[in-house]
Image: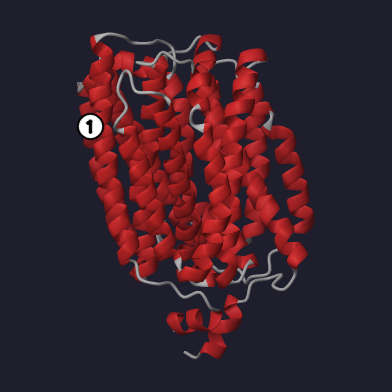
């Protein structure tokens, strides 16, 4: 019950070794960068993939959805694997699996093949993302984690820019396959360096994997997302109604099972901590609100404004550039002021950015997109490092992997749901199949359809602002997390 008993548990391994900290953060940033490159570059390459693989629009949507779904389903469990077998070991394994999946994706010959290999990539991505936060928490003391998360935020912004530039160049001048091949040398280097340099110093925990929980959660989420996608493409049919009907008992059964399972998929006991619960819920609503915005704006630029996927993405680069600059400073500021202030200011800036997006019309100067992207990029880059450091500061060290995975699950559920909802909202304004084709950059629209799409986009953006308002309330009311080891030790007793 005393601080003396719990304080040693909070001492990060390698503490006091600046060189180890620098190497660790570089390796973690490489994982974040790879993921960001993959995310933006794959979106740019989808139209070319569809033609080259003789596939269809609905199948290509699952090139993105399959990856996000696997990361969402496995997030907490691969984080728990890090708690059981070692976070560094699972993180390095993730690099290896992600690299192998990238190679297989680049070699794919059919649509179903690339979707299947994206599942492999997703497994590696889950191992990387769910254990990266835990490695940072293990390596850096509580009062310096915000800065560390800020540096990884810079890695995401840099990766997103590289994904747009390099991905666009590959698609235009070489082949979409190099979008995946570029991950191979980076992944090999990161895996080797990680095995040679990174080390686990925290005690392992004894636990089991919640297989039934994963099956219930994964199946329920799969049927729900499939139903949303089918409704977008074909309207409400017997098939989509059956998928919705199947998802409900599976998700209810998951909640019931989690309350009685001895080693649950979601450790609900962590959610008894106010700061942790509010921070994760804020991450969910922020992702639900903001991920849709990216695709709606790209649809607007490619559809009514007639830009190519490459040109449309270039207008978003300034936001990523500023975001990469802001993230390290925002993380350092959250170490001094606490996550509540910095994350909340970030959500306000994001809201202002989306308000700017909501003014877009058929003749709006395109510099408005740049202005909105700058506000949005600065806001998200302030929110993420501050919010992530608050989660890890509020979790006991023995559960860093679970907490990191739980945060990723909350964010990814919001992200993948936002993706489906964005397409659904677009499909309410224009013909469903056309909405998919505009999203993929396969076709353009004009005349009355253009105005209908802009009106629908405005409604979707207003919904996003409302969701960000919910995230802001949660962020403000979260309370102040403990940033010193003594304070945390007292809070854990």
Query: x, y percentage for residue 125?
Result: 56, 42
Q: Depth check: 438 or 61 in front?
A: 438
Q: Secondary structure at mark 1?
A: helix
Mark 1 crowd level (few <14, some 14–19, many ≥20, 10 Å Cα): some
- Residue occupying the point 69% across, 51% down: 27
Query: x, y percentage for residue 288?
Result: 34, 43
| Residue bearing mark 1 | 459
Can residue 342 be seen here? The reply is: yes
Q: Depth check: 62 or 218 in front?
A: 62
- Residue occupying the point 37% across, 41% down: 353
Query: x, y percentage for residue 238?
Result: 20, 22
* Image: 472 above or below 98: below
- Relative to 205, is 369 on the left or the right? left
- Relative to 57, is 404 on the left or the right? right
Q: Would you identify the image quadrant in which residue 164 lies?
A: top right
**Quadrant including the C terminus:** bottom left
Can residue 58 be seen here? The reply is: no
Q: Depth check: 282 or 181 in front?
A: 282
- Residue occupying the point 22% across, 23% down: 428
């Amino acid at each position: 019950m005393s601080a003396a008993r719990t304080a040693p548990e909070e001492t990060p391994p390698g503490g006091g070794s600046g060189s180890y900290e620098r190497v660790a953060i570089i390796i973690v940033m490489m994982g974040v960068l790879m993921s960001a490159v993959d995310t933006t570059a794959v979106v740019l390459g989808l139209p070319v993939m569809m033609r080259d693989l003789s596939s269809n629009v609905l199948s290509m949507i699952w090139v993105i959805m399959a990856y996000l779904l696997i990361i969402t389903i496995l997030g907490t469990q691969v984080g728990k694997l890090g708690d059981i077998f070692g976070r560094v070991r699972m993180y390095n394994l993730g690099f290896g699996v992600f690299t192998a999946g990238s190679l297989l994706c680049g070699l794919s010959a059919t649509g179903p093949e690339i979707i299947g290999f994206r599942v492999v990539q997703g497994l590696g991505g889950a191992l990387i993302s769910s254990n990266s936060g835990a490695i940072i928490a293990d390596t850096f003391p509580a009062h310096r984690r915000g800065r560390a998360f800020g540096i990884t935020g810079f890695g995401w912004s840099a990766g997103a820019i590289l994904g747009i530039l390099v991905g666009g160049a590959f698609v235009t001048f070489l082949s979409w396959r190099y979008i995946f091949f570029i991950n191979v040398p980076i992944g090999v280097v990161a895996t080797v360096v990680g095995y040679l340099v990174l080390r686990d110093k925290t005690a392992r925990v004894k636990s089991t994997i919640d297989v039934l929980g994963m099956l219930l959660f994964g199946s329920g989420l799969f049927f729900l997302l499939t139903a949303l996608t089918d409704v977008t493409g074909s309207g409400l049919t017997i098939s989509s109604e059956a998928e919705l009907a199947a998802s409900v008992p599976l998700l209810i059964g998951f909640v019931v099972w989690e309350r009685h399972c001895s080693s649950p998929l979601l450790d609900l006991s962590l959610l008894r901590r106010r700061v942790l619960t509010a921070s994760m819920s804020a991450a969910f609503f922020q992702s639900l609100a903001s991920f849709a915005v990216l695709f709606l704006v790209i649809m607007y630029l490619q559809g009514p404004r007639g830009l190519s996927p490459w040109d449309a993405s270039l207008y978003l680069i300034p936001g990523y550039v500023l975001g990469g600059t802001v993230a390290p400073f925002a993380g350092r500021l959250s170490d001094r002021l606490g996550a509540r202030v910095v994350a909340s200011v970030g959500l306000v800036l994001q809201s202002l950015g989306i308000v700017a997006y909501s003014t877009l019309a058929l003749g709006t100067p395109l510099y408005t997109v740049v202005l909105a992207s700058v506000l949005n990029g600065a806001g998200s880059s302030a929110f993420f490092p501050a919010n992530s450091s608050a989660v890890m500061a509020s979790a006991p060290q023995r559960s860093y992997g679970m907490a990191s995975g739980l945060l990723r699950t909350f964010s990814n559920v919001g992200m993948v749901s936002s993706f489906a909802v964005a397409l659904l909202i677009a499909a309410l304004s224009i013909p469903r199949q056309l909405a998919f084709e505009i999203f993929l950059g396969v076709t353009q629209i004009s005349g009355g359809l253009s105005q209908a799409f802009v009106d629908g986009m405005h409604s979707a953006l207003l919904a996003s602002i409302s969701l960000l308002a919910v995230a802001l309330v949660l962020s403000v009311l979260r309370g102040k997390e403990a940033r010193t080891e003594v304070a945390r030790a007292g809070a854990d007793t």
